[in-house]
Image: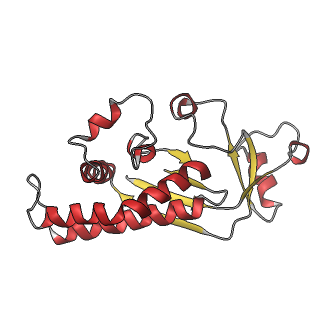
Amino acid sequence: MGLDVQVVNGLTRIPDEEVPDGMEPYSEEFYEWEENTDNYIKFIDRENGYFEKYWTKHLDPFKTGYYRDEGDSEHSFRVGSYSYYGNWRKLLALAIGFVHIGDIWKLGPYNEDIPFIELLDFSDADGNLGPTVSNKLYNDFEGMQDRVYEFIDNMMFGVIPGNKLNMTEVRDFKIVYEDWKLAFEIARDSGMVSLQ
């Protein structure tokens, strides 16, 4: 088990009058309906569930409803095991100046000025991120890349006290960093990043 990420762009809302009466998301009828269209269909639920109670902006600007996947880009990648992803996020938090990733979780309401906050203070196993947050995170990944990479390289050379990273660990960190950056670049165009 581990974290897999799927990304699409070009999601467009299906008008309610085009949705078959009584349609239940991801039911047998849903898949039959989807099979008879030229696009994949996603259901976005902004009214129920844990994620909307805590992460209220993560799916903006999407509203509850059915969406066609009409995009021209997609991407998927495997981050690794959940423990690997937890360690990867700890390194990212260290790179932007936090001593412990737990310090981020204690901050309370989001301070959107903190780079990567929407990813660092988010589920490590499940959830979706919409275009607004994806655009912000893409800018964080692009704008902070040199600083983060310098920090990670310095961990390999022992410049920074603490856990020393080997070349493979540094390479793997950067591969995952690039995958996240590409994911958010794609999803900022009416798309969605799905953690599974």
Where residue 180 sits, quadrant-wise, is bottom left
Residue 68 vs 123, above or below: the answer is: below
**Which is nearer the eye, 29 or 113?**
113
> Which residue is farthest right?
17
Residue located at (41% from left, 53% from top): 3
**Which is nearer the eye, 67 or 149?**
149
Where residue 192 sits, quadrant-wise, is bottom right
**Which is nearer the eye, 60 or 193?**
60
In this rendering, does residue 130 appear at all? no
Residue located at (58% from left, 64% from top): 186
Q: How many marks?
A: 0
Residue 155: percent from left, percent from top: 15, 61
Quick check: 70 left or right of 146? right
Quick check: 155 left or right of 98? left
Quick check: 71 left or right of 128? right
Colour scheme of this structure image? secondary structure
Residue located at (29% from left, 54% from top): 88
In this rendering, does residue 79 appear at all? yes
Residue 64: percent from left, percent from top: 72, 38
Residue 176: percent from left, percent from top: 36, 63
Residue 123: percent from left, percent from top: 43, 41
Residue located at (87% from left, 44% from top): 20
